[in-house]
Each structure stands twice: as structure tokens, then as C-alpha cells.
Amino acid sequence: MNARTLPIRVGLLPGETIDSWLEAIAARHHSSWRDLLDAVGLPAPGSTVSSWIARPTLAETVALVAATSATGADIAAAALAHHDTRALRIDPISRTLDKTFPWSPANTSRFCPQCLSETGGRWQLSWRLGWSFACLRHHRLLAETCPGCGREQRHRPLAAEVVPVPGRCASPVPGAMGRILCGADLAAAETAVVFEPGHPVLAAQHTINTVIGSGTADFGVYAAAPQTAEAALTDIRAVAARVLYSATTRSLSRVIPADLLDVCLHGDAAPRSRTPTPTLLTAPAAPAAAVAVTATLAVLGAPDAHQGGQALHWLVAETRGSGAKPLACMSKSGTSPVVEAIELAASAPTMSPADQLRHRIAHPMPRKPGQGTTTRVYALTRAIPSMLWPNWSLRFALIRPQQRQLRPAISIALLLTATNLAIADAAEALGGYADNYQVNRALKLLVGSGQWHDIRHAFTRMSDYLADTDTPIDYQRRRRLDYTDLLPDDLWERICWESGAVSLNPGTASRARRYLFEKISGLPADAAPAAATDNPRFQPRTTDFVRKLTPELASALEVHAHEFLDAHDIRDEPPFWQPPTDLLDGLHLPGPNSADVDIDQLHHVVRHEGHSIGAAAQVLGTTPDTIRHVLGTCPAPFTPPAGDRGAASRAAKAALPPDTFVELYQRQRLSLAVIAKQAGTSPAFIKRLAHDYNIPIRPAHRQTPHIDANWLRQQYLVHGRSLTDLANETGATWAALTNCAQRHNIPLRRNDAYYSRRSPLTEAETEAAPPLLRSALAKMGGLGWLNDFATASSHPNLKVAAEHLGISRPLLSQRITELEAALAGEPLLTRARSGATMTLTPYGKAILDATKQIVLPGNPDRTD
């Protein structure tokens, strides 16, 4: 159809709808509706929202331009397609509205009576949208019906023969036939009271208009994650529908201004309380829409999802109390993740701690576990040890439970975070070292710590880090290894010797093995396979093993851990690893930060002051578990105490590297005893060192060397050398030299004579002795005991005295104890302690004086 230019031009008003504009042209020409459409080349519409009213074709646009001299852009802006993909959807083929898009315009339209009065009855395009409920120019709600007939406007197309009258009701008179129209003045329609500028309902309408006009929602919760207008309006519809469905007058009165709520409750279009809306696709009456959208934007306008959740919490309580469907239905209506996040944040107070972790309540955008959960579970199962790393678990330390119960519980909690696993399944995946009760109890106690908000943040950060980071250790593989050959006893003994440590008791190897097992496997130390030599009574002390740990010992254990993993074909992982702690910076957590411990002070109180783990924790103002972790990470260097017997061995090892040992033992043919004497250590240590150096030991020869009697007499009597000195020179024993001297009638000096005489004295000799000594002299070796006592009394301590006598300190102590028992049972000496000099008791002084009076036949006079 070819359009001709109309004689009278009528311009389009800003924001006017295309059919209103054509009605105004028809009225100006006094033309019927059909004649006007024929004149501009348009077909009569089948409904008020179809064909060219929704989206003019190119041919229809060209015809309109030719007939009216309007521009194509003006015509496009006057059609509903101007809001396509923002406030509505139009099928491009049929040019009909998609009724699945929320609150699309129905076959009616709201209107502002005052705007109609000012524009001569011209209709705004925005009034056709279900999202329009208020006029921002006149600060009032839009009207719904004709003041005369009470019918909704633009429910059906104009009759073809009717001459349009802008601003008048075009609905047929009820019961009338033909062309009799109502004709009431729509400008006389009554609406709600005029609202003050800045009223929440006007602000809500402004926000809706801005979203539709820009095509993007970036206000409130959308600021961090902007959404399209379509997505945002879908969100608003979902929440608003729940408000209409569940909210009561009492609850609405807390979030809606009284004047707006009064209009909604008492107006003609007021919904009944608790009455569900017929469908979520149909726009409610303007007052109800105003209430619902205003309440919704109070939620979506919050700065973040959590504050939005707080703003929505009243509706959560209302829903739970009404028996209505849960709020979860809001996020099942095609809404964006923003609504889900707000909904979860609002429901968080009613969730269990485990569910709060599953739904990432601590995250700025909480969400339900969805696609990708399987991948996350796999990554976390690989990355999380059964016993959480101490540097993380200590930050959650409570008085109860202890770390050995808390660490597996937190590991399971991390696996629950952002996954849909049940606690039992998560526990099984990590080895089953905590059950449902233990995990729930630990989480409940953490909730009760008063710092649950930050604890949730910490769990979310830790879980996300482990899921998103390629951590260097596969703990799932470590859990499956066979640890029966880890750190055998003989290897542990060699490590102790090489590192200068001393195995103090049989349980040390067991504790070291369990300690190393937990570090390598991530499993609890109690799960370590028991060796045949393990003693169960040492197991509870495993945690304090770190007090004996030194840097050298820790390094040796790490070397063995490498060797152990290499033997099990694991060559691409470090033996130990722990994640960074800066993930927890800025959070207020109940436990101490191990980084705050003064390591130098800790090493001093443990090594120099000899404090236990608990005592060191008190000195440093922290927990024993924190001390254990720091000592395990930074072992205290070993400081040998005064008189440390191992110091000489360590010095000897440093002075006897393998090449020096080979030179002395294999080339110079020195004995182990001679090498030990030169190095200042024991032959047993030198033998051990030879074993460590893989140097074969020569077989021992027990032949007594030949001793020349004349040489012995010359060296012993003339030069005054001791039998001990001569024994060391000849390689003979002290006893062999004594026997040789007695065979050749070489008189022995007092010490040697008394020491060599082991048989009891004769009766005459005993009777000649002082009475105080007779009971001791009657014993086998009693004379030797008295001689040893007399010699020891002139030395500062038993150690020096034993060295002078050429015997061991324990043997000398035993002889003096036997002498005390043979006499009156009273102590003879006050032993040296803490550096003090040994002294005689009064009884001991009396015994010493009596001993100096002994004169035996055939013995030389003594020189005391």
C-alpha cells in the first residue's frame, strides 16, 4: 500500500507511543481510525500490542516517514521495540511479545491523569511497561482504570469506524452495542496522594527507568558485578513476587513508608494479604507493584550481598513462619547469581556451620555448590592432608578440642567448603580420622568463639587457595604409601651419631619415626605402622620429640624422607610443605600466630634453661602446640652442657675425617685404642666411626706382650713411673704388670699394693689394725676399699680421683659405698654437686685417720 503525505502534520512527543501519535493525527484530521491507517499505509492491528505497535517493518516505517515527515529514528523510538531485550522481548518473526519475560506489558496500560491533561491526551510508551507504576514528573502513582466505566485502558484496539478522541476512554459502554463508547475524561481519574521528592517509591521508579534506559544495572549489589537490564529486571521480579506472595501487612510496615502501604492496602487494586499472585509473568496493580519493587530495591540497592541479605532477613523469617515455599524458589526463576547470593546471605543465620561453608557464606557472593563440584573435590582431596598443617590449624586453636582433634576436623571442613559433600563422605575421602560428631562439634565450638565471621572467611580463603593452586604434594597418594620401612632403628642410630645427637632411651627411635611419618604423610602420628621394637608407653610423648630436634638432626631426617619417597617412585615432590599464612592476614582468629614467637628466646629457654614445652609456652606467653610447631620448623641448635660426654665424640669425629682415619688405622696400623686416646674419646666411638666409614676392623689379638723384669724395675722404682703409664706404653694390662712385679719381687708402692691385694687380711693383721677398721678389713677387698677411700679423700671429686687411680668413676663410687656398708653404714664423703668440692664427713675423717695408722708386716713404711 502506497502512503500519501498527510495535509496536517502532528509531531511525535518525547516518549510517546506510536499508536497514541497516530490517534492524535486522526483526531486532528477528524478521520476515522481505519481511514488514517489506510492513509499512512498500516494495517489495522489485531491487538494493542502486536505488529507495527511492537516493531514496524522497514516498509511500514518508510510509509510512515513518507506520510508524516517524521524520521525513522522517531518512529523506532515510539515502538515497543525501543525496549526490546531490556524491559521486554519481541519475537522478530511474529512481532509478538514473549510472555515469559517478567512483567511484560499486558493488553492494558497504566497512565498519569495529569500528564494526559497537560499533553492533550497523548500516551507515553513507558506506561505500557509493567515496570511503570509512578510518574516522576507529578510524584504520584499511575492510574489503572477509567473513572467512568472502571475499565482498564487500551485493553482492545480502537474500532475501525471511530474517530479517536485523545484523553477519553475508548472502551465500549457496558451492555451497549456498536460504536457507543464510554468517552469519560481520563484526566479526571483519581490516584494516590502526591509523594514528597525523594520518596522511596519515586527513587525505586527512577532506578527502574535508569536500568531500562541504559540497558545495564550497576547500582547497589550490581556495582561489583554489573548485569544486563533483562537479568536485573528478572531478579527484581523474583524478589518482588516473593514479597507479594509471603509478606504480611505487619512485616511490610517495617520496610515500606506508611503512605505507600496505605494506598496499597486501601486502594481499589489492593491485593489481599497472603493471597499468591496468579502468575509471576503478569504485572500486579500499580500500588502492589510499587510496594513490591520498593521493598525489593531496598535489598538490591544494598552495597553488597551480605547487607542485602540482612535487608531481606525479615522476609526469610516471614516465609518460615507462614508455611510458604522457601526463598530458594527465588533463585530458580532464571535469576542472576546476585539474587542467589542475597538469598543465601539472608538465610545464613538459619544454616548449620557446615552448610554455611558449603554455600560460601563468607564470600562476597555466596553461592550454592553447582557445576564443577567434582573437579573441586578432586583438587581438594589431593591438596589437603588428613591432619591440617599446624601453621594454619593453630590460628583456630581453642582450649577444647586439642590440636590432634581439631586438625583433622578442619581438614574435613575445608573439603566441605563450596562442595556438596556430606561430612561422612568428606571424612572418608581424607582417610576417616574424624567422624560426623567430631566435625560438627569442632565447628560448633568455633562458632561459639565469637569470631565465626572471620573464621568463615579464613576457611573460604584456604579452601579456594588449595582448589585453585597447584600445590606441590599429592596427599591422596601419600595416604596410600606403605610406611613400614620408614626410619628403621639402625638408620636412626646412625643418624644420631652423625648429627651429634644421643639416643636417650629406646623410645626415641619410635617417636622420631612417628614424627617423620606425620610430616611426610599428613596422617596422624597414631596411624604410623608400629615397628617390632616400639614400646607403646613412649607413644604419647611423640609430640614433644621436637624438643630434641636440632638443625643437624632435622636435616638428616629430611634427607631420609627424600630417600624414602624416591624408593616409592615419588621424585617430583618435596618431602614436606606447608601453605603460606598471609592468606589469613587481617582476620581476627582465636588462635595465636606462630610468627609472633621470638625464636631466639625460645631456643634459649629450651636449650640453656632446660625448660619443657609447657614451661617454654608459659615464658613466651603462647600455647604448647605453638611451641611445638615453631621448634619443628626452626629447631633449637644443640648446646652441650658442662661435662657433656658427647662433646668429645663430636670433636673426635670432626678431627677424624675418613682419609685421616684410613691413614692412622690402615697405613700406620695404629690400634683403635691408640686412635681413641689421641682423639680424646672412647674406643667404642672409634669403632662406630670405622663402621660408618665402611673401614673393616682388624681381628683382636689377646696375646700378652713380653715384659722385661729389669726394664720394669728400672722404670717403676728408679724413674717412678706408674703401672698405668707403663701399661699404656706396652699394651699390657695393669694386672699383668702387677703380677710381673710380684713374681720378680719388685715392691709395689702403697696405691698399687693396696689395689692389688684382694684377699682378706690374716687374723694377726686384723687384730693389729685400729678397731674402727676391723669390720672392713675382714671383708674380701676391704684393704683396697680403704686405700681407694684414702686416695679419693684428697681430690675435689670422685671423677678426678678415679682418673688418678686408673679406674672408672662408677667403680670407685661402688667401692666407697661397699666400704660404708662394711663399717657403721654412715657416709664417709659429702659428694661434689653443682661444682662444689667433695669433703669428708666427721665419721669419714675418723676413718681416714685410722687408715693412716695401718702397718702391715712386709710392707714398706708409708709416706702419707
Image: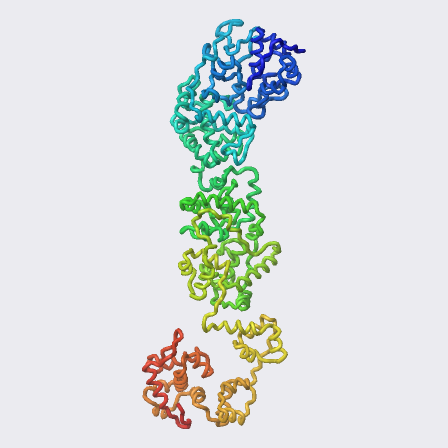
Rendered residue at 58%/72% (across/down): 691
Q: Nearer the viewer, residue 698 or 45?
A: 45
Residue 572 image position (x, y, % from top left): 61, 54
Who's the residue at 63% across and 21% down the image? 92
Quarter residue 767 falls in: bottom left
Which colour assignment does the render follow? Answer: rainbow
In depth, the one of 501 and 45 nearer the eye is 45
Q: Residue furthest right?
A: 2
Vertical side of 83 occupied by 183: above or below: above
In the image, is 789 to the left or to the right of 82? left
Q: Position of residue 137 (x, y in %)?
A: 48, 21
* Residue 143 in sight from this viewpoint: yes
- Answer above or below: position of 588 versus 242: below
| Side of 819 where 676 appears, left or right | right
Q: Quadrant of the N terminus?
A: top right
Pick the quarter of the image with the C terminus: bottom left
Relative depth, front residue between 164 and 519: 164
State whether residue 244 appears in this view.
no
- Residue 38 locus on image (x, y percent): 63, 9
How many numbered circles does the render carry?
0
Query: Where residue 6 appears, x then y in whole percent?
Result: 63, 10
When asked about the image quadrant of residue 687, the answer is bottom right
Which residue is at a point 53% across and 69% down the rendered structure image?
497
As displayed, is residue 165 above or below residue 814?
above
